[in-house]
């Protein structure tokens, strides 16, 4: 028996079907965010720094400056990642061929280059309207803006974005997740909390009014942004209630968007009890919503276990959302995505039925023992075997390829 067969036998002795686990992993798409490649810059060239209370810190050389560069970097990354992949786009990444098209005038055809790219690389696509880094979002307000003209500009952007998502879905022949996140909030204690929320509700109603095929709609809450610390219009309660009252609109959970001891892994089952889909942004908050590269840490593993043991591989739509500008950006994609997949594989290799039975029978000592013993099972051998069957490097040997790419390509971008 080789190392893989020995490892497999250990899991099978627990009653785990390893072949089924590997098939399930290979079939689960991870939506990889395009914005790690250029520090959430986009291609509009409208002289706007990243705004909206989010920040990419660091100055590592070689960030992508054009669609061609971003596509090349993304292709390098996905060549080192096993399994099914999607690319998550923002409206600010439209490829307009030099034409200046404002956000409320964007159309599906401005994403044709991405559709071709997706087809060539066998990727699905997800989409996000971009409610930040724009002169009309300079004060941190968009869909809740008290100025009706500005608010309606952003409503039109929301409407166009859903149409773009529908256009992409039609061209690819598969659904597109369209995620609405807005930065709206106030730096200091507001005098009116309800007014902005009622305006946001009205804006969302207008955006979601049109029935469109192929679009999965969702809304993403958060607690605060930089410069918007005291109040966030689109809070957790607001969007959860909105989604509950609007069938077809789902509540996306970003695990950087809660207070530090609140865990998304603990929230998922509550939403799975009520919704048939649960979109996620998987990130790593360090002291704040810092969007560090996803590590294989306890919370990532617990999120993956919630997906697997609740039979929710088809319901939970996994998207990554981090942007570290202080390290090689291609490596950042590879590390974070492989970690998400490793977490899923570990979860798939657990005897969940047996562990649930221990809980139901009140055998908490044995449950604790088994959960802890599982941590030293030979997971790495199964992962390596999976990578080999998928034709990607099984271990850190992928890193040499990224360093070669840095030398040949990234370092030449002055
Ligand atoms: C911001 C949200 C949002 C963004 C992306 C770029 O706090 O997490 O999802 O990170 O849309
Ligand atoms: Zn997010």
Image (cartoon, rainbow, N blue to C red):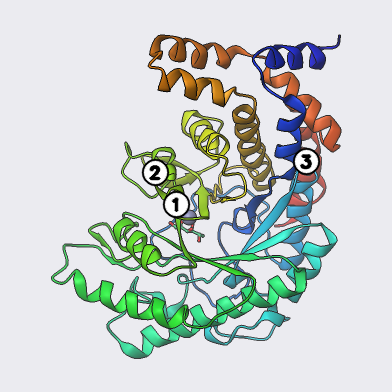
When asked about the image quadrant of residue 261, the answer is: top left
Question: Front-most of 188 and 129?
Answer: 129
Depth check, front residue: 407 or 239: 239
Report the Cα–Cα distance between label 3 and label 2: 32 Å
Callout 2 secondary element? helix
Task: Point out residue 397 in the picture as x, y percentages from the top left corner.
Answer: 79, 29
Frontmost of labels 3 and 2 is: 2
Say which residue label 3 marks. 80
> 403 or 108: which is nearer to us?
108
Residue at 34% across, 80% down:
202
Residue 366 - label: none
Give how far across and how far down residue 121 sits, in percent: 82, 57
Residue 21 vs 245, above or below: the answer is above
> Does the image show residue 35?
yes
Could you tell me which quadrant the C terminus lies in?
A: bottom right
Q: Quadrant of the N terminus?
A: top right
* Residue displayed at 38% across by 16% down: 362
Residue 318 at least partly seen: no
State the image quarter where residue 406 is shown: top right
User: How far is mark 3 from mark 1, CA to CA?
Assistant: 27 Å
- Along the horizontal axis of the image, is 256 left or right of 224? right
Q: Residues within 10 Å of mark 3 (few under 14, many from 20)?
A: many
- Residue corresponding to mark 2: 267
Q: Position of residue 404 (x, y in %)?
A: 81, 40
Label 1, on which residue?
Answer: 253
Graded by Cα atoms within 10 Å as few (under 14), some (14 to 19) or many (20 or more), the crowding at tag 1 reads many
Q: Residue furthest bottom?
A: 149
Q: Pick whichever of labels 2 and 1 is earlier in the sequence.
A: 1
Q: CA distance from mark 2 to mark 1?
A: 9 Å
- Estimate how packed mark 2 is, as few (under 14), some (14 to 19) or many (20 or more) residues with alpha carbons within 10 Å: some
CB contact under 8 Å: marks 2 and 1:
yes
Q: Residue furthest front?
A: 361
């Amino acid at each position: 028996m080789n190392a893989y067969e020995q490892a497999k036998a250990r899991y099978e002795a627990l009653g785990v079907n390893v072949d089924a686990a590997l098939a399930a992993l290979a079939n689960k798409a991870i939506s990889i965010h395009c914005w790690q490649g250029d520090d959430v810059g986009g291609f509009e060239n409208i002289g706007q720094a990243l705004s909206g209370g989010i920040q990419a810190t660091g100055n590592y050389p070689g960030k992508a400056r054009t669609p061609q560069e971003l596509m090349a970097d993304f292709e390098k990354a996905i060549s080192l990642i096993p399994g099914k992949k999607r690319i998550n786009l923002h409206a600010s990444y439209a490829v307009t061929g030099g034409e200046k098209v404002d956000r409320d005038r964007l159309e599906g055809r401005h994403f044709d280059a991405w559709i071709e790219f997706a087809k060539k690389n066998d990727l699905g696509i997800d989409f996000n309207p971009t409610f930040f880094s724009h002169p009309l979002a300079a004060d941190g307000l968009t869909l809740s803006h008290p100025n009706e003209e500005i608010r309606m500009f952003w409503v039109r952007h929301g409407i166009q974005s859903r149409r773009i998502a529908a256009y992409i879905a039609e061209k690819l022949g598969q659904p597109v997740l369209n995620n609405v996140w807005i930065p709206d909030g106030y730096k200091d204690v507001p005098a009116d909390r309800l007014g902005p929320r009622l305006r946001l509700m009205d804006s969302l109603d207008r955006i979601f009014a049109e029935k469109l095929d192929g679009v999965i709609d969702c809304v993403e809450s958060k607690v605060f942004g930089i410069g918007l610390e005291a109040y966030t219009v689109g809070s957790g309660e607001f969007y959860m209630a909105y989604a509950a009252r609007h069938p077809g609109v789902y509540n996306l959970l970003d695990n950087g968007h809660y207070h530090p001891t609140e865990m998304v892994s603990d929230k998922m089952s509550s939403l799975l009890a009520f919704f048939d889909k649960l979109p996620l942004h998987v990130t790593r908050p360090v002291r704040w919503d810092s969007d560090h590269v996803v590590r294989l840490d306890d919370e990532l593993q617990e999120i993956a276990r919630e997906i697997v043991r609740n039979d929710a591989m088809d319901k939970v739509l996994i998207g990554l959302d981090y942007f570290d500008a202080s390290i090689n950006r291609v490596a950042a994609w590879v590390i974070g995505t492989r970690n998400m997949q490793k977490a899923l594989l570990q979860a798939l290799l657990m005897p969940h039925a047996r562990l649930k039975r221990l809980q139901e029978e009140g055998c908490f000592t044995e449950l604790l023992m088994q959960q802890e013993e599982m941590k030293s099972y030979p997971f790495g051998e199964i992962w390596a075997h999976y990578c080999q069957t998928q034709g990607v490097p099984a271990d850190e040997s992928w890193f040499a390829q990224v360093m070669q790419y840095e030398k040949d390509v990234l370092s030449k971008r002055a």
